[in-house]
Amino acid sequence: MAAKPLKQAKTKPAKSRETAAPAREPAAAALIARRIEEDIVLGRRHPRERLIEQDLSDLFRTHRGDVRLALFELEKKGLVERIPNRGAMVRGLTPEEVTEIYAVREELEVMAVRIIPFPVAPSDISRLEELQREHAVAIAKGEMLNVFYSNLRFHQALFGLCGNACLIETIDLLAQKVYGIRSYANAFPEALDRARRDHLDMIKALRGSRRDELIELSRRHLRPSPEAYIKAYEQRFGKAEPATA
Amino acid sequence: MAAKPLKQAKTKPAKSRETAAPAREPAAAALIARRIEEDIVLGRRHPRERLIEQDLSDLFRTHRGDVRLALFELEKKGLVERIPNRGAMVRGLTPEEVTEIYAVREELEVMAVRIIPFPVAPSDISRLEELQREHAVAIAKGEMLNVFYSNLRFHQALFGLCGNACLIETIDLLAQKVYGIRSYANAFPEALDRARRDHLDMIKALRGSRRDELIELSRRHLRPSPEAYIKAYEQRFGKAEPATA
DNA sequence: CGCCTAAAAATTGTTTACAATATAGTTTTC
DNA sequence: GAAAACTATATTGTAAACAATTTTTAGGCG
């Protein structure tokens, strides 16, 4: 019933022998979640498409338990909508939601850039340059999945410089929420190239410790994606009159 | 801690063939998660205390599946730490983590206050006043669970005025991460009273559309909790020298 | 023909049983 | 007597069966 006296927390030492924890073998559920996420990112699954547990179980050669957990995870991430007893579907974002998410992203990413300690270590600059090259290569080869992941890694490394783990995590979280709309902007090759050049400029600003320039770049870098999505949305469903301010 | 069996009535008259059902019947797992969360908030479960699935299943008169899901949920919320094959425990936050979380909270809450459309409708002011009164009553009666929830509702209503759903959700998320440390600050009655008066001042600033004052109040309002926690932490474990960030 | 009702199928949600892993305790060996 | 190896127990992870719910399909009635 109540807590067993067996081996409760030792409220004593907080020994730093906690290092036995980094067992980072992603559970099957996490892998499945990532695969579904990729499908959504690359536009292979469209908003409002149903995600049926048995189908996914067959697809991933596993049982429903894992798939179920993956769907719960994706629901929390905001990529999937789950209605009790009726199942899960790919979540579609309204232009309003997208606008709001990007407003918060801008605030947080600017915050991150604002608190990066300058000057940045040369080794960190090198790492960013390497990630930028990977990104450029993926774009040149047209490997969209690699474009996605290398871009992700670049930004994680960049914002990682700020040193605030919670901020980094939150930025990641919000980025994930709009994974699904990237395929709209990335459909235009010039947008990809623009992103690539932005990254180069960011590295330059970092190297020169020009914070204001970096902030402005970060702001601009966020703009194309929501604009492309909203344009595509309105073209498809018609321009919605603003409901409530 | 006594536990009521939380089985709900199975006969659901849900004849609602209406629209996409917003049926918000929280799953059993969600209820369990909330109960555990409350225990953590009120200090009834301490950091590093183990959460064993079978124990919780007995306690809540349910099977392990629900408990398992609840623990996954709490892990995502950041209140619980789960180590594969070893189980879950209440997560303890280091002073560094707390400082970082509060830095992000401040940024976001200030953002919310900055974009609230002024003037605020009288009905919204009234609602805030009502919530404030509930909070004051709960403090006076010493009902800590009510203090917690009424305070939560007040802030949700306040930040809800900003109109950005994503921002509201993110603010909530970060607040949840530090639920567990509130009991440290709330142990001091003067801290509770200070919070109460802060709320009154906020309402006054809102009514007068004095944005800068509101921003400053929001900043100040966030300060006592992490300070109290860090002080208690250092007193208990000894002051840690700042590690390399 | 349209609409309501009822059976059937599809899908999700719950429960139990079983297997894998980690922790604690005991014995063996040097 | 201490360390290593082994056994026992406790706990989590996985899988399958079962139950409840929703959606689809078919049929009857106006």
Image: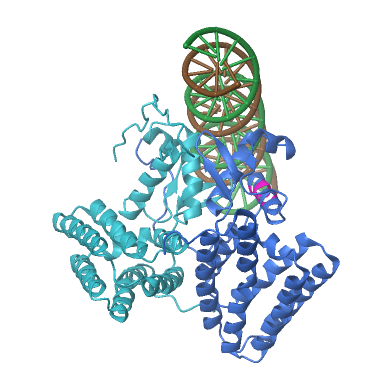
Chain colours: A blue, B cyan, C brown, D green
Residue B112 magenta:
no
Percent position (x, y) of residue A180? 64, 57
| Magenta part of the chain | A30-35
Percent position (x, y) of residue B152? 31, 58
B99 sits to left or right of B189: right
Q: Residue at x 27, y 65 (%)?
A: B121
Q: Say which quarter of the image contains residue B225.
A: bottom left
Q: In which quarter of the image is the N terminus of chain B?
A: top left
Which is more toward the observer, A58 or B101?
A58
Q: Is residue B40 above or below residue A215?
A: above
Residue lying furthest right in this view? Answer: A141
Q: Say which quarter of the image contains residue A50.
A: top right
Which is more toward the observer, A46 or A37?
A46
Percent position (x, y) of residue B7? 37, 30
Q: In this view, does B29 lie above or below A135?
A: above
Percent position (x, y) of residue B34? 38, 46
Main SS type for the magenta part? helix
Does residue A31 appear anywhere in the picture? yes
Q: In this view, does A136 lie above or below B79?
A: below
Residue A33 magenta:
yes
Which is more toward the observer, A28 or B117?
B117
Does residue A16 appear anywhere in the picture? no
Q: Residue at x 63, y 70 (%)?
A: A156
